[in-house]
Image (cartoon, helix red, strand yellow):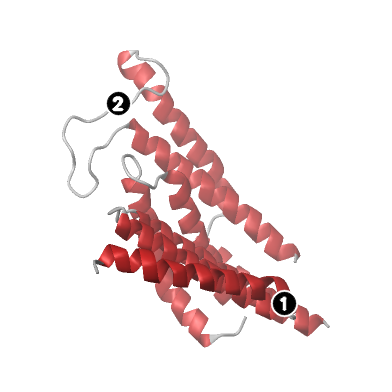
Amino acid sequence: MKSVILKTASTYLLPLLLLFSVFVLLRGHYLPGGGFIGGLVASIAFVLHAFANGLQNTRFMLRIHPGFLIPIGLSLALIAGIAPMLIDGSPFLTGLWFPNPIPVIGMIGSALFFDIGVFLVVIGVSLTIIFTISESA
Amino acid sequence: MTIYEFLYYIIMPILSLSGVLVFVRFVLGPSLSDRVIALDLLITIGIGIIAIYSIVNNMPTFLDIAMILALIAFLGTVAFSYYLEKRDKNE
């Protein structure tokens, strides 16, 4: 689509939306948000870029095929689940927390890494689906 | 008249009435473009209702939901217009 307004807007919206998705991801433990909706916002950012600049440019900007994010995210979530079993022998998916909160990010625990895994899986799945559909259309 | 009475008795009826009117246009809409515009406007009215809800219940986190809804509505309108343009070229 040849629209100067949309192209310029997407250049500014892409980093802004990625920042917003990370904000939603980090807030998700006690307030509305989390890995799923954060991943959706991030994939919306890339889809908007693809609509404005063409699919080839977005694929070139991403460098890797978005499908590779799915195994990375799944293994990260699995590691976050197994870690408490290895460290102190508590059951699978028990929450492990560092005692002191870290500035900006807040409390860090295994739940955060599980959420990051969900985030990556959602980005990978939705971008793979949407890119495949818009290629064949 | 407090701000809450103003929101309940003036703004909410206006938004509800306009929602009904826009939905009538969405159902009748002679062309596909009218329906796309009506859908966009319906979501915008929904954003207004969410904003009022978050003010009345004093929950600022609901405004983020309105923001994500606005984002999805914008993307949907862009996608609809993209495929409308594509279809016009093919015919």
Spot occupied by residue B50 in the image (x, y as percentages of width and height): 41, 60
Q: Badge 2 local density, few (<14 within 10 Å), some, or many (20+)?
A: some
Horizontal placement of B83 versus B4: left or right? Answer: right
The quadrant of the image that shows the N terminus of chain A is: bottom right
**Residue located at (69% from left, 64% from top):** A134
Residue A96's label in the rendered image is: 2
Name the secondary structure under disc 2: loop
Of residue B35 and residue B14, the one placed in the foreground of this image is B14
**Can you say whether A91 is above or below B35 in the image?**
above
> Is residue A46 at least partly visible in the picture?
yes
Q: Position of residue A87 (x, y in %)?
A: 31, 18
Residue drawn where x is 37% and y is 48% of the image: A25
Tell me where residue B13 sits by quadrant: bottom left
Q: Which label belongs to residue A41?
A: none
Pointer 1: what residue? B32
> Tag 2, which chain?
A
